Every structure is written in structure tokens, then in C-alpha cells.
Image: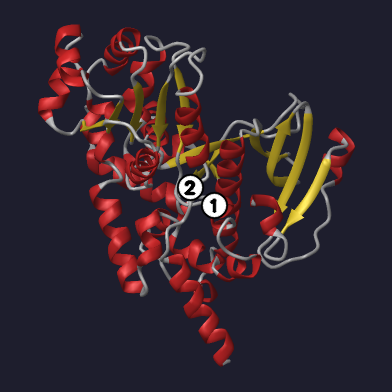
Amino acid sequence: MVYFFMLALRFRDRLLMKIPRYIKKDILDYFSSKSKSKSKKNKIIILYGARQVGKSTLVGEILAKLSLKVLKINADEVKYREVLASQDLKKLTSLVKGYEFLFIDEAQRVENIGINLKILIDNFKDLKIIVTGSSALELANKVKEPLTGRTITYKLFPISFLELGKKYSDFELVDTLEERLRFGSYPEIFQYETDLERKDYLTELAEAYLYKDIFDLTDIRHTARLKDLLKLLAFQIGSEVSLTELGQQLSMSKDTVNNYISLLEQAFVLFRLSGFSKNLRKEVTKMDKIYFYDLGIRNILIDNLKPIKDRDDVGKLFENFLITERLKLNSYKKAYASSYFWRIYTGAELDYVEEKEMLLYGYEFKYSKTKASVPKSWIETYKADYKLISKENFLDFIK
């Protein structure tokens, strides 16, 4: 008993140490190697991710490794936004002249950021540039066309098990699963020792940052309804969602509900999973499932941070966790795959399906079970791979 108590303390102390971000090496290698190869075309690194996932911290660690003169700009400051939105080469030159590296944080707040970045990179061939955006709402639209062929894009998520696996043993990872299912994986959550501290942090995160970009960058009139929608979606993770029914509950049109969900997707709060089909008449594909990028956010929205043993939604939490971790893994590893769920009208279903390199892989998620029968319809129709993922073998699926 004493041994396991000491082990838990040691694991907690190690969690408080810095967790290496997986994409750090890729970005650092790009900037380091560029200085040695003049033949490489200079490109802007764009780093997307929700607020508080560690974008600024990551860039700071990268800059600390480079011996360059750096101009750091927080685009929340009006004085910088005016210059960066000017489309005036003289003003932009006065800002960056003499610097070797330009870092713009919260770049989505700059009007016409893409055009101005194009002016900079076209006129300062050796200037290295990295920009971060806590929302794709504006940044994605504003940089896509002006900077075609001039960018390399990364997404940063809450801490992944892929990243934790670089620092901790499999035993330790399994041991922390329940904590991740309850409190999520935002970087700051790892420094707190008590449930009350974690709850306070998640409450602040949800209230202060979750909707910030959506409200700042759009003209949403019904802010309360957006929050109510998010709460309803939090109760329905792992289930097919009817936009019509949600609209009726919130006194909104189906199209408005769809638009609000799209905004929440672009702000990296949640994502949709569509039904897989090869146009077979028996397959259900009309409604999507909704999942959250972070379970701590999901749980605080419904005010349920109870221990796993006291919950009735463990299966849904486990499913959301595995799908989110799989998406992180595929994104960081650049393993390009299409993700779906699968269900037919007779009731047979799979929680998760991946289509990769013309091959199909089906997965069923069961928190406790170690055995489950593969749906006969899946095997007969697709003759595709199938695997049960449980608490016993989940690390192989996400790490």
C-alpha cells in the first residue's frame, strides 16, 4: 500500500514537470535547417489551437533554441494591429527592420493578416515568421488565398497521450486515465493537486476563454443560446445529434444551430463525426455525432466532475477520449485518414471507422469489456479489419 502511495506521489511530481510537445521538433528543425539551406523557399509557420493549449509557451521554447533577434508581437495590442493591418510596406518595414524572426501571437485579431504577411515574406526573404491563432474563425479565411504555397500549418491540441508517452511509462499512463476522463488535458490542469483546484481552473477556462473568439470575431446576437446549445451537446456526446430537435429545444432554426456548431468547431471546442457509408440503403448517415476536444471542458459544462466509479457516462467519456486522442495522433504523425462512425438500421454499429490508403478499419470501444463480437454486417459488407479497444489495450490505439 505504501509503495503505491509513493508511486502516485512520484507520478504527480513528474507530471508537474514540463511535458514535451510533439510538433516542437518539426518546427525547430524547419527553422534551424532553413538557415543552412538557401535553396529552401521561406515559408510562414501557422500554429492553430484553442486558447490555453500552450501555443505561446511552445513558440517561446522554440525561440529559446534559436540564436536570432526576435520581435514578439501580441496582436491583442491595438498599436501592433494597426501597423500589421496597414498593407503599407513602409510601416511594416519600420516594424520588422533589424529583426531576424517575427512572432505574432493571436494573429486572428489582425485585419487582413494574410495580405500583410504576404507583403512581409515577399519583401523580407530571410525573415522567419511564425504566427499563432486561437481560432480558425478569421485566420484560416484570411491567410488561405493570399498566402497560397507560402505556409506550413500545424494544430496544437490539449496534451496528448502520445506526448505523455515520451515522458512516462505505460503503467503510469494507464494509472492517469481516470483523471484525464474527468479533468481533461489542458496543460495547466497538470499542475493542480486537488479536485477543487482543477474545478476552479476549468470553470475559469470555460467562462473566460471558451467563447471569447466567437463573441469577439462574430456578430452573434444570442450569446446565451450558444452556451445553452453547448451544454445540450455536452450531454449528447457519443450520440447522433438532430439539428432539428436542438433547434426546437432552443427556439432556433436548424440552420442557426448548424452555424453555431460550425463556429464551435472553428474555435476548437468540439468536432463532428459523420456516418460512414458506401451508399448502401441500410446504412444510417443523416446525423452526425459530436465530440469535445477536451473532456474537462465537457464535464464542467454539465457540472459533473464526479469520480469514475460514481458516474453513468463512463462509456461515453471513454469513447470521446479515444476518438480525440486518435485524431491528435493522426494529426501529429501526419497519418492522413478519414474518420467516421458506422451504423445500420438494424442496430449494428461501430463506434469508430478509419479509411486510410483505400483500406477500412473498424473499432468498438468498451471501457471494461475485453470481448465483443464483430457485427456480421460489417464483415459481410466490407471484409474489413475490426478491433475491440478497452481499458486493457487502449494505449496501442492512441500512442
Determine whether the residue tagged by mark 2 lies in a helix, strand or loop.
Answer: loop
Q: Nearer the viewer, residue 165 or 67?
A: 67
Residue 276 appears left or right of 332: right
Mark toward the start of the polypeptide (2 vs 1): 2
Q: Dividing the picture into quarters, in which one does residue 130 lie?
A: top left
Establish if 250 lies above or below 169: above
Q: Nearer the viewer, residue 323 or 118?
A: 118
Q: Is residue 221 visible?
A: no
Mark 2 near mark 1, Cβ–Cβ under 8 Å? yes
| Residue at image mark 2 | 21
Which mark is drawn over residue 163? 1
Residue 205: x and y in percent read 29, 53
Residue 186 appears left or right of 239: left
- Colouring mode (rainbow / by chain / secondary structure / one colour): secondary structure
Three-letter residue code for mark 2: Arg
Alpha carbon distance from label 2 to label 1: 6 Å
Three-letter residue code for mark 1: Glu
Establish if 5 lies above or below 353: below
Q: Dividing the picture into quarters, in which one does residue 177 lie?
A: bottom right
